[in-house]
Image (tube, helix red, strand yellow):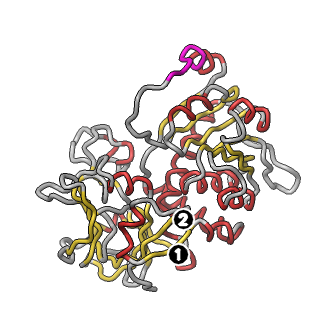
């Protein structure tokens, strides 16, 4: 079968021929891959910034944002059958007995760092024609989400972050009051840093959760991302024309910042103006660069005197995948055109290298088979 592979020592990306996998246990499921999204992580691995091949291999099959169709199931598989659509989870637990997170099936909080990740660290990914994995890492997707289900995995980043925000903010009066008739209105202000797929999906999740949303990104208006933000009832502001201090004048007190750009200079500038009782969520991982200057005394004073919280969030658990699937359905009903616009184009496998080298678009997707 064909696969897209990175050879770190050769600094090379190319199509490879891989052995087609077979079921190995009674709980295994074989998938025909339908679509795999290309994200910033894939591009960084293709640029050999990181990425670890499986033991004994010189190359890593990449890809972790995926949608597959069940072809075959083991004798003890109960929740899936041939023809079902599924999104496979990415991270696999470490084997250390003392890791409470992994032993509790929350490997997204692994204590040891010895986890593996499909297409990223020590395990082959999903940018290939067939995949076999255990049923417990497969999340079923309703057929009506077929055209947008490849967005599930990037949406899980926002879902996990918002779940943590909800827990943290139980420390204070936080929930929006209810209007007559039980409809929730926006009473909290969120700023999303970055208008890539993770940022835009995060903006959708925040709008759906009842936040006023401003997306703060570099590209001047007009542009397709700004139009998408406006279509969901948000506001797009360009950092090219509006400073961070001017952003606060436009927004007012910022209750939540959802960082999805991986730019530390911008992130800490916005952290400086986070509002009282606010929470700042980091999800981006900056590239290795030189140090930046920041007013650490001001940041520390704000954190203490304004009751602020800063947290980082990475990967996602099964419940976050299930939340993403539920919310994608809600987005599709509420903003069908905007959700469809998230996918810029679908491309055959032989165009993978060009996509990994930086083709423009919000979310470019490789297609393997139409399937069901």
In the rendered structure, the answer to whether residue 239 lies left or right of residue 184 reads left
- Residue drawn 63% across the image and 50% down it: 219
Task: Provide residue 269's location: percent of width, then percent of height.
Answer: 60, 29
Task: Provide residue 78's location: percent of width, then percent of height.
Answer: 35, 75
- Residue drawn 68% across the image and 49% down it: 220
Q: Can you say whether 72 is above or below 212 in the image?
A: below
Tag 2 near tag 1, CB within 8 Å: yes
**Element type where label 2 sits in the image:** helix
In the rendered structure, the answer to whether residue 203 lies left or right of residue 81 reads right
Is 131 or 13 nearer to us in this picture?
A: 13
Is 44 or 82 nearer to us in this picture?
A: 44
**Element type where label 1 sits in the image:** loop
- Residue drawn 61% across the image and 68% down it: 329
Find out whether residue 295 is within the magenta segment: yes
Dot 1: within a 10 Å radius of its alpha carbon, few (fewer than 14), some, or many (20 or more) residues? Answer: few
Task: Provide residue 217's location: percent of width, then percent of height.
Answer: 63, 46
Q: Is residue 163 visible?
A: yes
User: Of label 2 and label 1, which has the lower sequence position?
Assistant: 1
The residue that mark 2 highlights is 325
As drawn, the residue found furthest toward the right would be 180
Q: Is residue 124 visible?
A: no
In the rendered structure, the answer to whether residue 88 lies left or right of residue 345 reads left
Dot 2: within a 10 Å radius of its alpha carbon, few (fewer than 14), some, or many (20 or more) residues? Answer: many
Q: In terms of image quadrants, where is residue 166?
A: top right
Find out whether residue 53 is within the magenta segment: no
Task: Provide residue 138's location: percent of width, then percent of height.
Answer: 38, 67
Which contiguous range is marked in magenta?
Answer: 293-299
Quadrant location, the N terminus:
bottom left
The residue that mark 1 highlights is 142
């Amino acid at each position: 079968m064909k696969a897209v592979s990175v050879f770190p020592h050769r600094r090379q990306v190319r199509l490879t021929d891989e052995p087609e996998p077979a079921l190995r246990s009674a709980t295994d499921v074989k998938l025909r891959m339908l679509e795999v999204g290309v994200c910033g992580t894939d591009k960084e691995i293709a640029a050999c910034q990181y990425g670890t091949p499986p033991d004994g291999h010189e190359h890593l099959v990449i890809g972790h944002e995926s949608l597959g169709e069940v072809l075959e199931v083991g004798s003890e598989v109960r929740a899936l059958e041939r023809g079902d659509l599924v999104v496979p989870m990415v991270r696999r637990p470490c084997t250390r007995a003392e890791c409470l997170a992994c032993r509790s099936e929350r490997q997204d909080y692994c204590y040891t760092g010895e986890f593996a990740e499909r297409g990223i660290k020590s395990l082959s990914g999903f940018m290939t024609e067939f995949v076999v994995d255990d049923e417990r890492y497969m999340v079923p997707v309703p057929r009506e989400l077929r055209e947008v289900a490849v967005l599930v995995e990037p949406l899980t980043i926002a879902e996990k972050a918002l779940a943590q925000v909800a827990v943290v903010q139980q420390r204070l009066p936080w929930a929006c009051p209810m209007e007559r008739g039980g409809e929730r209105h926006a009473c909290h202000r969120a700023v999303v840093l970055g208008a890539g797929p993770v940022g835009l999906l995060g903006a959708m999740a925040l709008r759906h959760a009842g936040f006023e949303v401003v997306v703060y990104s570099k590209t001047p208006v007009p542009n397709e991302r700004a139009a998408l933000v406006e279509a969901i009832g948000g506001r797009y502001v360009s950092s090219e024309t509006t400073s961070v201090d001017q952003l606060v004048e436009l927004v007012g007190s910022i209750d939540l910042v959802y960082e999805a750009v991986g730019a530390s200079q911008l992130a800490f500038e916005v952290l400086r103006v986070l509002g009282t009782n606010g929470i700042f969520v980091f999800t981006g991982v900056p590239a290795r660069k030189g140090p930046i200057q920041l007013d650490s005394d001001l940041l520390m004073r704000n954190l203490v005197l304004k009751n602020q919280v800063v947290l980082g969030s990475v990967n996602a658990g099964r419940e976050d995948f299930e939340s993403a699937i539920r919310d994608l359905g809600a987005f599709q009903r509420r903003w069908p055109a905007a959700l469809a616009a998230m996918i810029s184009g679908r491309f055959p496998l032989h165009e993978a290298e060009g996509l990994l080298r930086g083709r423009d678009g919000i979310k470019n997707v490789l297609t393997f088979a139409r399937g069901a």
